[in-house]
Image: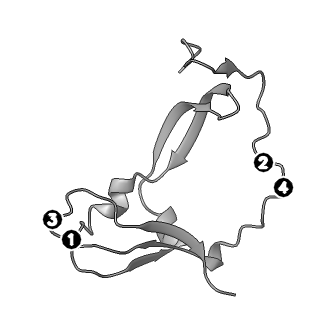
Amino acid sequence: MGTGPLPPGQRLAKGRPVSRHDPVPKFRPDRRHFQVFGATATGGTYSWTFDEVSALPGVTIETELYRASGSTSTDHEFFGIAAHTVLDPWPPATGLGRRLSAVRVKPDPP
């Protein structure tokens, strides 16, 4: 990505500024699941475990981060799963076009 022109009101941050001030909660993969639900073509709810989601093909992107505070940092690399990978098998209901019904990752109840 590099250091091209910045958007108006942004300034290049030096180093990697802290983006979170509170403790990061402990990650418990056995208590997480991923869902596609809402106005799908079948009206169903589709759910995967963390391990099932982790087995899906991923993509890597490099991008900048623009913060509301006005600082910009560059050359961030993110890895994840493209939305179409989980949404294409369960298209939206007729008449909705390509709208996203709902996607969420949430902890299972304790």
Q: Which residue is mark 4?
A: 22
N-term-proximal mark, 2 vs 1? 2
Q: Mark 3 and mark 2: span between their CA atoms?
A: 41 Å
**Along the line of sight, which residue is nearer the eye, 74 or 49?**
74
Q: Secondary structure at mark 3?
A: loop
Mark 3 or mark 2: whose residue is earlier in sequence: 2
Secondary structure beneath dot 4 equals: loop
- Residue visible at 29% across and 58% down in the picture: 99
**Mark 2 and mark 4 in contact (Cβ < 8 Å)?**
yes
The answer to whether mark 4 and mark 1 are in CB contact below 8 A is no
Q: Is residue 37 left or right of residue 29?
A: left
Q: CA distance from mark 2 to mark 1?
A: 38 Å
Residue 93 circle label:
1
In the drawing, does residue 72 fall left or right of residue 36?
right
- Residue for badge 3: 95
Amino acid type assigned to the residue bearing label 2 in the image? Arg
Residue 48 marker: none
Q: Dot 3: few (<14), some (14–19), or many (≥20) neighbours within 10 Å? A: few
- Residue ID for mark 2: 20
